[in-house]
Image (cartoon, rainbow, N blue to C red):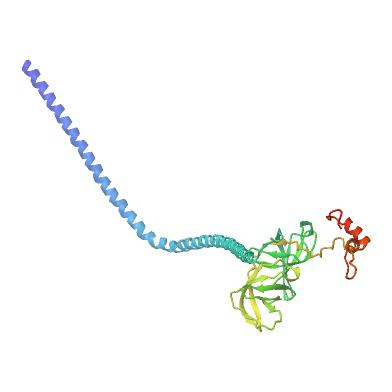
Amino acid sequence: MDVLGQDRREGLGRKAESRFVLLLMMLVSVLLLLSSLYSAEASVFRKARENVLDVAAPILSIFAKPIAYVQGVVGDVGDYFNTLEQNQALREENAELRQWMEEALRLRETIAVYERLQNYYAGPEATPIDAFVIGESNDAFSHSMLVNAGSGDGVERGQAVLDDQGLVGRIVDVGVRASRILLLTDVQSRVPVYVEDANLEGILVGRTKANPSISFTASTDPVVFTPGQRVLTSGAGGSLPRGLAIGVIVGAEKGDAVVDLYADYARTRMVRVVNYDFPVFEEAPEQGADEAPAEAAAVDSAASALTPTAPAGGDPFADPDARAAAAALPGEPEGVD
C-alpha cells in the first residue's frame, strides 16, 4: 500500500510539472506571436506612411510657395515698419543735433564778440510760443501756413516762426486764436540776411517755384560767396532777430546766391513763434536843460562880482571896494593888506 501511494504521488508530481512546462511554452508562444504581429503591423504602418508622404509631397510643395510668399511679405512689412521707426528716431536725433549745432555756433560767435569788446551787454531774451500747423496754402501764387496760436497767446505781426530745422517765415495776419505765416518761398517774402564768414548782407527774396535767392545790397566791392556758406537773419530794420538760421548757399543765378532752406515745409507740423521784444531807441532827455543857462549865468555873475578888477598899472587891491570884495572871498585870511 505504501508503494502504491508513493507511485501515485510521483505520478501527480510529474503531471504538475508537465502542466507548468506546457503553460510556460504556451506563454512564450503567445509572446512570440504578438512580437511577430507587432513587427508586421509596424512595417505595414511604416509603408503606408511612406506612401502618404509620397502622395502629399507635391501637394505640400504647391501650398508651400504661397505660404513662403506670405511669410516674406509679412517679414518685409515688419522690416518696413522697423525702418520707419529707425528713420523717425534718426530724424529726431538729427533735429536735436542740429539744435545743438546752432546753439554752439551762436555761442562761438558770442564768445568771439565778447573777446573783442571790453563791455558786453546780453541781448533781450525771446519768449517762445509753440503752435501746431492746422492748414497750408501752397498754390502757384502764395505759400503760407495757418497755426493755432493768435493774439490771445501773445502772437503779433512780424514775429519770426521757426521749426526744428530753421526759420520758416514770419507772421503776417493775426487772429484771436489763429495766425497766418508767410513762408520764405512766397514771392512776397523779403527777409534781410547776411552770409556768414563773407561780410555780405542782402535781402532774401522768395520765389514760389524755386529756392529763394539773396539779392545783395549794391556795393562797389565785388560780391564773393561760395556754396556751403550759412545764411542767417541780419536783424536789419528790426524786423527779425539777428542770427536765426535760414539755410546754406547752393549756387548762383544772375549774380544772386541761391539758398537751400533748412526748413522742410513738407513735414513741418509744429512751429515756434519767437515773441521777441526789440529794444526801442529813445534819446535821453537833457536833464535841467532850461535851468542850466540860468545857473551858469548866476555862477558867472557871482564870480564876476567876487573877482576884483585891477586898475591899469596899479595894485589890484588899491581900490577900497576891491579890498572889501577880496576880504569877503572864502578861504582868504582876514586882515589882508
Q: Is residue 290 left or right of residue 216?
A: right
Q: Where does residue 48 sit, x and y in percent of width and height?
A: 33, 54
* Figure quadrant of the N terminus: top left
Residue at the outermost right position: 321
Q: Depth check: 289 or 34 in front?
A: 289
Q: Quadrant of residue 337?
A: bottom right
Asked if 134 appears above or below 5 in the picture, the reply is below
Q: Where does residue 119 sit, x and y in percent of width and height?
A: 67, 62
Q: Quadrant of residue 113?
A: bottom right
Question: How many marks are shown on the rendered structure?
Answer: 0
Who's the residue at 88% across and 70% down the image? 313
Q: Where does residue 269 sit, x and y in percent of width and height?
A: 67, 62
Q: Depth check: 84 or 223 in front?
A: 223
Q: Is residue 333 left or right of residue 8?
A: right
Q: Is residue 129 visible?
A: no
Q: Depth check: 80 or 29 in front?
A: 80
Residue at the outermost top position: 1
Residue at the outermost left position: 3
Q: Where does residue 183 sit, x and y in percent of width and height?
A: 71, 70
Q: Quadrant of residue 223?
A: bottom right
